[in-house]
Amino acid sequence: MSHQSPILSTRPAPPRDAATACARSNYVEPTIRSIAGAFILACGILVLIKPEWSVLWAATLCFVGFNLFQSGFTQFCVMEKLLKKLRFKSELDEIRTLSRSHAEAEARAAFYDTLGLLNEVVVELSREGELAFLSEHWTKLLAADGRRNADFLGLAFLSFVKQHDRDTLEQRLSALLKGESDIVTLRFRMQREDRLEHWVEGKFARHHKHGQVHGIRGVLRDVTEAYMQEKRISHMAMHDALTGLPNRTYLDARINEAIEQSRSSATKFALLFIDLDNFKRINDLYGHKAGDQLLVSVGELLRASLRATDVLARWGGDEFVVLLPFPGEIDMVRRIASELLDGLRNDLEKQCRDTFVTVSIGVAIYPDDAESAETLLVQADKALFYAKSQGRNNIQLYADLQTRAPGFEDAEMTARFVAAVKQNLLEVHYQPVMDAANPRCPVSVEALARWHDDKYGWVNPADFIPLAENMGLIHEVGRQVLEQALDHFSKRNNTCDALKLAVNVSKRQLMSPDFYPTLLATVERFGVHPRQIKLEITESIALEGIERARALLQRLSDAGFTLSLDDFGTGFSSLSHVHELPFDEIKIDISFVRRIKTPEGRVLVKTIVDMGHAMRLALVAEGVEDSETAAILQGMGVEMLQGYHFSRPMPKEVCADFIARLQAPPAAAAAA
């Protein structure tokens, strides 16, 4: 019997009907044995009957005949056992062996049929890498029509693999033979006779024979269609559908790669943000299809103008980004950007004769302007924004903005302010408001929001309060200032029970439906009575309508809050509106106070004071910076004064000490 492995056997399988008949029919040999045994047994009995014949012969014939006769029924024969000991085979054993061979051949045929359905190729390689066995679809895999598998046996398997993939596959198969891995799975390209690129996925394992590694077995599967589909999907995910250029996802990956390369080689690269000026007019005049055609043309023009090492991507809309490696001279970036600008300008003038389309470019340099991909894109976008603000059709580098554009950091300041509000980093300083008749007696302290940033230092409230309004953070800023001020005020240690806390309230805060209940709950939570709180409200509240404003303010007044009309004279209302609203005092704006030393300014302030008194309202003047101004205001009858002449805004501890010194007896104050 052959010891060849079933998968390598080339012996043709028997016809299936013959194998089936052989397995299901009864054997003839047992019947012949019984008949022959009966005949021999009869002969032995006859010999025993005749005494003149030898008894030994008779006994031998009887023994042989009986064994043959009964073996046809019991399939046990002493003589057969003796002959098998002498290495003889019976016909029955041979039939059984043939039956097993037929079954194995049938199983192999079924296995090959199944592989044929799967369109996979089974190969066996010798230890030297030569083809030792090939299944049916090998010639189909290589597009070798008209050739047989036998034509390829003995040839090197790697000779049918593309040169680019050959080394990798050879290394992996060598590691497999050495036992460094159990199974190898990888994709590679086959060299087909039709010369088309053909991708194959191979799975290989060691083939053992008699306990030794005999070679390698593998299964090859054609994955060309799946691979090409994956490439198409990957291309779609990484490229813009309109222009075919790389998109943001692809660009982000390449920027990060460029950062790693620049760090290791100490080189630089630039990001160019390119935007079409007046592109909206193209869409408005000629439709979006014409706009799309223009974007495609611009993409092609840019690609033709750039080097092979540059990366061009469409950022979105009418914006493009160029990743530009350079050795370190920024002048080179300026030159390339200028060439792009001039080239695009000329081509766009030819394509868009009925309208004027130009290009603006913003440039950021790694690592000079930023050390991360995200920040670098932000800086390039800032440079582009500045280029547009300078009349468009020009180039701006982020590095030049610090000297050319003092306000270029507004976007960054906004981001840092938002972060500060979210992290509750705003501080509250206090400025005392003094009794004009007794400058040593503070009547209130105004809580003022202050913001200190690690980069910008102390930022003027005139800069960050409008940011809070525009970003929708004024409610949160007001809440933080109110809670800090109430916390400090509730823990104060002073002897002036009449001291009030003044808090600014914006119109947006006041108009919020939950402002009133939230304010009451907050004041109660800190153990402060509403009569100790002064709410400073700008006169723009009158723009909401007198009836609505009166209802809102009356509610606060009824709760016990003091209402102060802040920045009077700078808004859109008039004095005719003031007497209709339940204010308790008027705060004269600093712009009037600063002009009080002029005849015209003094007349304006005197008019405000007289009208305020006529309406039985207290007067507060802010911006008092010297004793002369304080004396003039006091002479006019202004009850309260506030300004640098008395004190600048102070942190809570400094303000507490300042008030304590003012309230101390004269002797103690002098000693201090």
Image (spheres, rainbow, N blue to C red):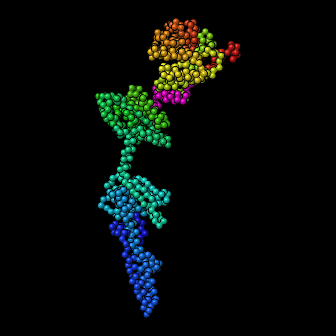
Pick the residue in front: 591 or 571: 571
Q: Which residue is depicted at the point 33% across and 57% down?
A: 140
Residue 399 lies in magenta, yes or no? Answer: yes
Rendering coords of residue 647 (x, y %): 60, 17
Residue 175 visible somewhere in the drawing: no
Q: Which residue is depicted at the point 48% across and 57% down?
A: 181
Q: Which residue is depicted at the point 68% across and 14% down?
A: 665
Kindly give the residue lying farthest to the front in the view shown: 49
Rendering coords of residue 110 (x, y %): 37, 62
Q: In the rendered structure, which segment of residues is drawn in magenta?
A: 398-427
Please identify the quadrant where the N terminus is shown. Answer: bottom left
Rendering coords of residue 180 (x, y %): 49, 57
Q: Is residue 452 above or below residue 12?
A: above
Q: Is residue 63 above or below residue 276?
A: below
Q: Chief secondary structure of the magenta span?
A: helix
- Quarter of the view holding residue 669: top right
Q: Is residue 571 above or below residue 173?
A: above
Left or right, residue 106 beside residue 562:
left
Rendering coords of residue 447 (x, y %): 56, 20
Please identify the quadrant where the C terminus is shown. Answer: top right
Pick the residue in front: 229 or 168: 229
